[in-house]
Amino acid sequence: MKKKISLFKSLHLNSKASEEAMSLMYSSFYKILRLNLKKDCYEEIMVFSKEKLPDRGYSHNFSDWAKNFAMTGNIYKDDMEEYLEFIDMKKIKNRFQEAPKQYTVKYRRNIDGIMRWVSLDLIPCQNYSEKNQIVYLYVRDIHDSLSKELNDSHLLQTVSEAITRSYLACVYMDIENNTSRLIYVDEKIRSYLSESNSIQETLNNSIIFFTAQEYQPRMMDFCNLNTLGERLKGKSIITSEYVGTGGHFCRANFIPVGYGDNGDLKSVIYTNRFVDGEIINLRGQLETERVLVECLTTLSGSEDFAEANSKILKNIGEFYDGDRAYTFKIDYEKQTATNEFEWCNTNTRSQKNLLQDIKLSFFSRWLDLFSKKDIVFLSNISEELDGNSIEFNFLNDLEINSIIVTPFYDNENKKVTGFMGVGNPKRNIDTDIVIRSATTYIMEEKLKQTYTEELYRMSYSDMMTKTLNRAAFIRDMKKLAEGNDLNTGILYADVNGLKYTNDNKGHEAGDILIESAVSLLKKYFSRKKDKLYRIGGDEFVVISSDISEKEFQTVVANLKDILKSKWILSCGGAWFQRITDIDQATKDAEKSMYRNKADYYASNGHADRRSMRTEGN
C-alpha cells in the first residue's frame, strides 16, 4: 500500500507517468482526489469511469458531494453514520490540526449493484501546514482481500503461532456454514471442545465449563450468534471480561474476518485468554492514581503546610511500604541538609534528630543526579555502592539497605532545594511516578505559598524604606485594642525639613533624609517586639510591645538627647498598660511629638504653627 501511495504521489507531479503505473492505479482505486481543506473543494486525480464526477478542478464543494454521494444509495445503510462522521469537513480539519498523518475508514458501498468493502484513506501532502491544507483522498477496493483472509491457511497458521503463548483458545468460526476450526486450544480444555459441534454448542460448552457461575449469563449474551453480526458492525473487535472457574481473570474476543457480497458477517475468530497480569497492573495504576489524588487533595485542602507534608509522607511511605519517608531541606550557605519532616512505619523508630545539619558532601553523588532531574534508586547498597564510600557508611549507619530519593527542583532559580526519600521500600519499587509527582506537587504548593506570602508582605510594607506601612499600622493597632496585650509603648516621629529638602535639594536628597531617620529609629528600637511603620510621607510610628514604662521612656529620652545635636526628626512617646482606644493612644503619642517639634523650631529660630495649634486642642 505504501509503495502504491508513494507512486501515486509522484503522479501528481509528473504528467508523463508510465502506462504501467496508470494501469495499476485504475485497477486498484475507485477514485483519487486532491482536497483543499481550507476551501472545502477538490481536484480529480483519478475517478472510476462509472462514477465520473461532472466537472474537473475546484468548482465543486467537497462536503456537498460527499454527503450527496452517501444519500443517493451508494453507502451501505449500516455504515452510513460512520462514513458521514469521517468525511465531515470540520472533523477532518480537526484531525489534521492535531496530527497530520494518515486516517482510514472502512465501509461497504455499491459497486455494480453489489455492496463491496472499500477503504477510504486521507493522507496529508508532504508540506502540509495551516496555510497549505492539501490532503489526498484514496478510495480502494478491499473486499477480495478480506474474503481471501477467510480461507488463507497461512494466515491462520501465523495467527496460531502468535497466540499459543498467551491464549486459552483461538477458534475460527464459519458462521455461514455453522462450522468451526480449532486454531489453538490449551490441552487442559481441548476435551471439552469439538470441531464437530455447532458453533453455538462449542461456545456454550466453553461458558459452562470455564466461566464462574455469576458471570455465565453475561457470557451467554456475549456469545449469542443471533446478535453477533449486529454487534460487530463497524467494529474490528468486541470484548467481554469475566472470572473463570479457577478464579483467573479472563477476556473473550470476537474478531470479524469475512463478509459476504451483501455485507453480512460470514466468519469470525473467537479468542479467550488469561488477563490476570493486566488486572494486577490495572490495580497498581488505580492505587497510584488514588495516592496522587490524595496528595493533591491534602495540599489543596490544608492551610497548615507542615501538617500537609506529614500526611503526604504517610501516603508515600505506605505506597512503597518503606520503613521511613522523609523530606530534607538544603542550606547552601551552611552547606548542610536537614530532615524537616518524617513518617515512620509501625515499630520503626524515628531518626529525625540524627539527621540535622548533615554535611552536603555526604550527598554529592545524589546532587549530581538531581541537577539532571534524575532520581536516586538503590535496591541493595551492599551490591551497588563501594563499601568504603561515605554514601555507603552513611546509609548503612541508618540501617538503610535500599532507598528511592527524588529532588525538590526549583525551576525558576534552576537549583535543587531539597529532596524526598523512602528508606527500605518493599513494593511498587518499579514505579517512581508517585514520589516524583509528590515532590512536584509540594514544590508547586511551596511556590504558591511563597507568592502568597510575598503579596501579603507587599500589601503591608513600604517599598522605599522596607518598613511596615499604614495598612499594617491600622491592622496591628486594631489587634492591640481587641486583644489582651499589656505594657505597650507608642512612639510618633516626624522627619524634620523634608519639604524644604525636596524643594531645594531634590527628592533624591529627601529620600536620603528619610532613610537616615529610619536607620536612627531602628537603632534605638531594635527589639524583636519593636515594629516600625511609615504612616505618611514624613511620619513614622513605633509600637513597642511587652515593655515596661521605665524602659520605654528611657529609650525615648536617649533618642531625644541624640536629636538635640542632629535634628533629623522630632518624636514623642506615650506608654499604656492596656490600649482600649486606638485614636486616643495615637493622639497622645502625636501630641508628645509636636512638643518635641516645637523644641526643634525654637532651636532653629522658627515658630511651629502646627505645634501651637495642637497644644491648643
Image (spheres, grey):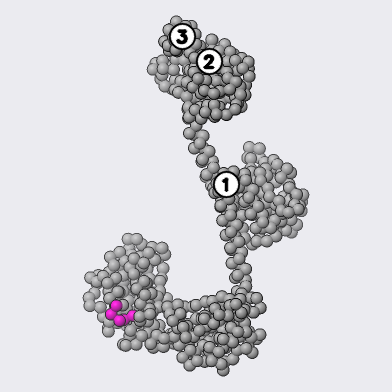
455 drawn magenta? no
Image coordinates for residue 526, horizontal then vertical, percent: 60, 23
Q: Specify the quadrant that holds the C terminus.
A: top left
The image's mark for residue 601 is: 3
Question: From the viewer's perspective, is residue 438 above or below residue 478?
Answer: below
Q: Residue at point 65% right, 58% down?
A: 319
Amino acid type, label 3: Tyr
73 drawn magenta? yes
Amino acid type, label 2: Gly
Give the CA distance from mark 2 to mark 3.
15 Å
The image's mark for residue 302 is: 1
CB under 8 Å between callouts 3 and 1? Answer: no
Q: Give the range drawn in magenta.
A: 71-75
Q: Specify the quadrant that holds the N terminus.
A: bottom left
Give the CA distance from mark 3 to mark 1.
57 Å
Q: Residue at point 33% right, 80% down?
A: 75
Could you tell whether 610 is left or right of 27 in the image? right
**Which residue is the site of mark 2?**
572
Q: Residue at point 61% right, 58% down?
A: 432
Give the CA distance from mark 2 to mark 1.
45 Å
Depth check, front residue: 211 or 523: 211
Residue 2 lies in quadrant: bottom left
